[in-house]
Every structure is written in C-alpha cells, then in structure tokens.
Image (cartoon, helix red, strand yellow):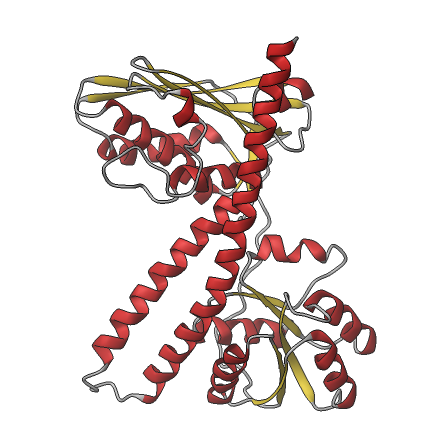
Amino acid sequence: DITDRRQAEDALRQAQKLESLGVLAGGIAHDFNNLLTVVLGNLNLAQMHLPETAPARPYLANMEATVLRATELTKQMLAYSGRGHFVVRPHDLNAVVRDLTHLLVVSISKKVRLQLDLEASLPAIQADVAQLQQVVMNLVTNASDAIGDREGAIHLSTSAAFLDERALRADYRVEAPVPGRHVILEVEDTGCGMAPEVQERIFDPFFTTKATGRGLGLSAMLGILRGHGAGLNITSDVGRGSRFRLCFPAVAALVPPKTLEDPAPGQVPAHGLVLLVDDEERILQTTGLALEALGFQVVTAQDGREALECFQARRQEIRLVLMDLTMPRMDGREAFHAMRDLDPGVPVVLSSGFSEKDSLQAFPDGGPAAFLQKPYQLKDLRAALQRALES
C-alpha cells in the first residue's frame, strides 16, 4: 500500500532527523561540560584561597550558582541525546503519579481539571524515578498550556498491554523493540491541538509555539524515553486536543533494589602521586592544582598512549590514576585495560562529560574504582578519590 509506505518513510526520516539532533546535542553537552569543569575548578580554588571575610566571596558564590545552573542545561541536552544520567530501578508507575498529584494540580491552570484513571496492579517498570517524574510533569504542564485560559480537562491514565514488534516499531517508534508486556502512560487534553507540521517539530530542541520558550522540555523527554527503551505515540486534532501515549517495558516483579552504601565520611589520605590524564590542557592545569591543594603530587598526560608510557615508567610511585574517557590516539577505555593488565590493583577514576551510565557501558567485565561526571566541584573530586582509594 502506497500510503503505508509513505507513512513509514516519513517516520524513518523523522527518526533519522531526531537521531542526528541527538548526536549533535550530546556532543555539544560533552564539550560544554569540559569548559564548565575548568570554570568550576578555578572558582573552587579561588574560594579555597580567600579568607571567609573577603569582599569578593559573594561574587564568587553568585558565579558558582550560575555555573551550576548551566550544568543543569547540559544535563537536559544529554537527556535529549539519550545519554543522560539514569539510576534505573524497578518502580510502580501508579505510585510515581500519585506522589506527583499535588504538584501537578498546583502547576496547571485553575480552570483545568486533572482526571486520574490508574489501572490497579500494574507490573513494575525499570526506570529512573527523577526522569520519570520529569516526563509526567512535562506532559501535564504542556497539556495545560495547550488549553490556555479556557476551561478544559487533562485525562491521565495508566494501563498494561501486550505489544508486538510491529506495534512497537510502527505505532511507538521504539528503536530496539522487545515484544511483550508494556505499561502504558497516557495524557490526553482538550486543548488547541497541533497541525501536522507542528507535530513534526515539537521534539526539536528549543522549538516552541509559545510566546516564551520551554527550552528542552519535550526534546529532553524524548531522550529520556530513548534511554529507557520506551516508545511514544502522538495523536492530535486542531481545535480538539492531543493525546500522548507512552509505553515502557514491564518487568516481572517490584523487587527492592540493593543499594551500595557510600563510604563513611573521612579525610582522603592525601599523599602520593596521581597520574592525571586529559586531552584538555586547561583541565590538566585546573584539576592538577586542585589535586595539589588536596595534598597530592601530580604527573600529567594528554592521551592514553602517553599515560600508559608514564604508568609503565613510574608504576611503583603512582598511587591513583584520574583519566578522561574521550581522548585522541588511545582513549581512556583502552588505557584503563592496559594499565589493569600491568597492575590489576591500581585504583582508576574515570571522568567524562557524558553520563556514568553511558560511559561505563564499555566496561561490562568490571569498571573503574570510581566515576567522576564533568563538570565537578572540588568536593566531588575529593569524594571520588576517597571511594577509589578505599575500594
């Protein structure tokens, strides 16, 4: 059928466009995180060396708060690319919705009724609860915006359904479909609806039909769904409203997760030689100064091959390795395995502008002693070193 073929081709083009935008957003976020690491590191060093009563302290505090807000933007960009930070555990979607109900009610127009229809005894889903909450909030607040100043209703429902591969690919645009039972989240509104050309662009970063933009809200949501192996179906009629239908793969049971306890707070045994590896010279300078401020000696390398040569020459002196993942000539993953072959007990902290989940996928058989997400503050650096040295 020609119509079905055209629809499939349109869906493929849209998926390819969004994938390209995701790669672009992820790359920009990674590079931006490297820059923020330098800014934040120098800020923390300046704060360390200033007396508590210094007149410049409030200005530095304002700068620090602004940089931390910028890191939230990069997190949204990583979420859009599907490379955001996820702490995935089994969750009851109904419980997540109920916990959000009060916040949802106060976040939407007083003229809009929020109606819940939650199916009992849903199977659990593997999800990051903070990201799941963000998805629900985005859908409901956007539905309220679509209704505007008029009276209207938002219907939020949950259910379970078996979805085969055809439905997952064609209806929900799941990139790697796993047929089976899925949990469905549906948000339907009586708002203004969307024309087809608007539907094609609503997940583009910063695209908006509102007077004031919502930034990366819906586009970040799409990245969150990608990261969870979830799918999305949209239907909308101009003047009648829209329906967003999401599907999440179900898991067998809601098992309480095992948690790793953080190490007891204490002073890092700040002595010995740290091999610091990064292809960004300013990160080497800033983080090197931070390590020295903590009491360590530092030797630096600008790629994995140079780091490996240094490690071979000074293996008996090096107490810990702090290494970036993305570098020329030899990346952090290759250098990590080569160092572990030489000395299986060496503590290695890996760092990246991408998320921990995305970065550590390359280490299925045992990863580093700690991971440090860029940009990081001095306290984050100290904590990562402590975890590595105590592991």
Q: Which one is in front, 102 or 5?
A: 5
Q: Position of residue 53 (x, y in %)?
A: 20, 86
When asked about the image quadrant of residue 42, the answer is: bottom left
Q: Position of residue 228 (x, y in %)?
A: 57, 38
Q: Is residue 86 above or below residue 255?
A: below
Q: How many marks?
A: 0
Q: Is residue 348 above or below residue 216?
A: below
Q: Which one is in front, 356 or 1?
A: 1
Do we see residue 140 in this rendering? yes
Judged left or right of residue 170, residue 235 is: left
Q: Which one is in front, 69 or 364?
A: 69
Q: Quadrant of the C terminus?
A: bottom right
Residue at coordinates 44% horizontally, 44% vertically from top-left? 130
Seen from this angle, which residue lies furthest right? 341
Judged left or right of residue 108, residue 78 is: right
Residue at coordinates 28% horizontally, 19% vertically from top-left? 191
Do we see residue 85 in this rendering? no
Seen from this angle, which residue lies furthest top? 1
Q: Is residue 71 above or below residue 308?
A: above
Q: Quadrant of the N terminus?
A: top right
Residue at coordinates 62% horizontally, 20% vertically from top-left? 8
Q: Which one is in front, 369 or 291?
A: 291
When asked about the image quadrant of residue 57, the answer is: bottom left
Q: Position of residue 178 (x, y in %)?
A: 68, 28
Q: Position of residue 35 (x, y in %)?
A: 45, 69
Judged left or right of residue 361, residue 201 is: left
Residue at coordinates 53% horizontally, 62% vertically from top-left? 353
Judged left or right of residue 179, residue 195 is: left
